[in-house]
Image (spheres, rainbow, N blue to C red):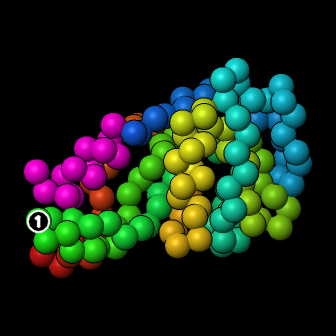
Amino acid sequence: MNGSRTLMMTLSALLIVTGCGQQAGSQTGGRTGPSEIKVGYRAFTMPVPEHQALNVRPGDFVDVMSTFDWKMGKEKQVRRITATLLQYVKVLAVAKDRKSLELMLNPNEAQYAALSVAPERGVWVIVRRDGDKEMEPREMADFEKLFR
């Protein structure tokens, strides 16, 4: 089994979705009250570049992607890839300075979110269309696949 397939299967196995349907009561820049967090979930503050938070509002659902280096293939060649780590994650709040988002995550999701914001990785938050609840394993993206 090649490294790409192994990582995709690993990420697919790790993909955990929130599926939270409650309405957010917090406003942009406001602090989320504990009553807004579902039982078994946590409020995770994720730092993001300001431009990524421009169109994000409390109550939106987002996907979280991360870019990182991964050793692939028999030669263990290091390639930069992007993978969707979390899908359909509820935004509880957006910082006034738009440099962080508060996300409702279960403890496993919080671990992967923390891993994705490590300094050597890039993190992207993608807003979903209202009502878009589709969740499925996504193929990892890398430039080699793009130019085949």
Q: Residues within 10 Å of mark 1 (few under 14, many from 20)?
A: few
Residue occupying the point 27% across, 52% down = 7
Q: Judge left or right: residue 126 versus residue 96.
A: left
The residue lying at 66 percent from left, 71 percent from top is 49
Main SS category, magenta section: helix
- The segment highlighted magenta reads 1-13
* Magenta-span inclusion, residue 8: yes
Label 1: state its secondary structure: loop
Give me the residue at 54% from left, 36% from top: 108
Give the side of residue 133 with respect to residue 92, left or right.
left
Q: Is residue 122 left or right of residue 95?
A: left
Q: Front-most of 144 and 93?
A: 144
Q: Which residue is mark 1?
A: 74
Residue 113 placement (x, y as % from top left): 57, 50
**Count of residue discs:** 1
* Nearer-the-camera pick, 101 or 1: 1
Q: Quadrant of residue 9?
A: top left
